[in-house]
Image: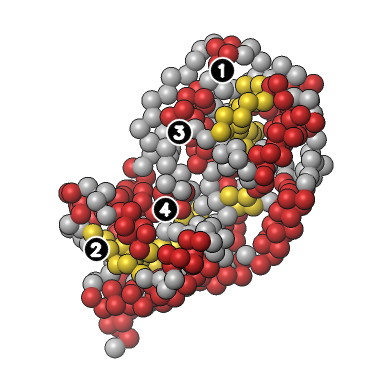
Amino acid sequence: MPSEPGVGWQFLIATLEHARTVDATVVLVTVRRSAQACAGRIPADLKRHLEVVTVEIPLAPPFFRWHYPRFTRLEHELWVRLAARHIRRIQQTYSVVYAHHVTFASEILSTPIIGLPSNIYKVWGPVGAGGVAEVFAISPTSPSSRKQWALQTARDRVASIPATRIARRCDLILAQNGAMERTVSGTGTRCRRFPNVVVDNMVVDLPADRTSRVGHPGIVILVVGHLITRKRQELAIEALASTALQDAQLHIVGFDSTSHGAYLHRRAEILGVQDRVTFHGSLDRAAVLDMMTRSDVLMHPSGREGASGVVGEAASCGLPVVCFERTGASSVLEDSGTSGVVLPADRATTQDVLADAIVRASAMPRLGTTQWTRQRFVDLAAQLYAEGLEFGAQASSRMGRSR
């Protein structure tokens, strides 16, 4: 699944697993295509704890599908307004312990749960896109990266307005990263860091001999992610041109048939490093994890994302990471407690600075983590249920005293 519905599915199953232990019902409010995707895939022992409420969106199949993904956020805003009516009816039918809005992860988009009464525990997140405009100003720049710089600069100025407005009407914020924590810090609403990263069922066999990895004795650099401007993979190619990495190999994984993919090919040719860059295209997760065990460094120079799943995977494999500060990648690396180098987001950063960070990371110990298992979602569901019960009891007590 793409990241948004994929995280929604993880939360749904985890919440259902906890609901089974307390004999509760999970009411899933979603769009028709997500309801259809869930049909037949819910384990039989969990199905009796689930009720699905489908929010019908006018013109959803033709209009929004024809223009996907351009109008996905517009579709979401329409969904929020329609879902609010359903949620009010649910609140009249059930004794709601807590309301949890999982997706979208962007803090500038609305949520229908804020319309619920004050005696219902409202949880928003994981939410927050950690972006740093200066990452897009690091050379080499292109019209696309300069556009991203302008968009991120504007976003930094306006995103806190809707984010703080929504946060004040919720009771708990699950922040994807440190940037979101800082955004809502002054609202008075409780905030907890919870990146939507899941790395489970992994058995990692780390090679003792670095020369056995990917068949080359030099430093092996891995870059994983969609080949789009926000990911800034060209910075890894730029670093490869430094004399410090003259024997290094770069492996880029991601869907290659994009305009940014073509740009990356051209940059490799211009810098004369095309013979040391391999574009693998899209690979399944097992193949990517295998490459991680046979690489020396994951370079993740993304300028904006909420929480980096690939950094969580690298940390679970013990692969050192190079990324930029104040991004979703650096927050995941920090929470992992594993090896890596976090670079300042400085437009004066040169290819030699990038190369030096890669060299330093490659010499770090390979420390794996079990931080990102799916069990943390189940544990969170149990905590939210307990907090919701306590919150509701306190609210009832206050109402009783006021009478």
Vertical position of residue 15 compared to residue 87: above or below: above
Taking 322 as reference, is 359 above or below it?
A: above
Marks 3 and 1, Cα distance to the nearest angstrom? 17 Å
Mark 3, Cα crowd under 10 Å, few <14 / some 14-19 / many 20+, is few
Relative image position of residue 23 (x, y in whole percent)? 17, 58
Task: Point out the tag, 3 or 2, that comes first from the N-terminus.
Answer: 2
For residue 59, the mark is none
At x 22% / y 47%, what residue is drawn? Answer: 43
- Of the numbered discs in the image, which one, if any, rests on residue 51? 2
Q: Amino acid at mark 4?
A: Pro
Discs 3/2, front: 3
Asked if the residues shown at circle 4 and circle 3 are in contact, with their CB atoms under 8 angstroms apart, the answer is no
Q: Which residue is mark 1?
A: 214
Q: Position of residue 185 (x, y in %)?
A: 57, 62
The residue lying at 67 percent from left, 43 percent from top is 260
Q: CA distance from mark 4 to mark 3?
A: 18 Å
Give the label on residue 284, or none: 3
Q: Position of residue 2 (x, y in %)?
A: 46, 48
Would you say 209 lies left or right of 33 here?
right
- The secondary element bearing badge 3 is classed as loop
How far apart marks 2 and 4 lie (CA) works out to 18 Å
Figure quadrant of residue 251: top right
Disc 1 secondary structure class: helix
User: How crowded is the residue under tag 1: few (<14 C-alpha within 10 Å), some, or many (20+)?
Assistant: some
Dot 2 and dot 4 residues touching (CB under 8 Å): no
Residue at the spot of label 4: 5
Binning the other alpha carbons within 10 Å of mark 2 as few (below 14), some (14 to 19) or many (20 upward) gives few
Instruction: Indicate the amino acid at tag 3.
Output: Asp
Q: Is residue 170 visible?
A: no
Determine the image quadrant of residue 296.
Answer: top right
Sequence-wise, which precedes: disc 1 or disc 2? 2
Hey, what amino acid is under mark 1? Val
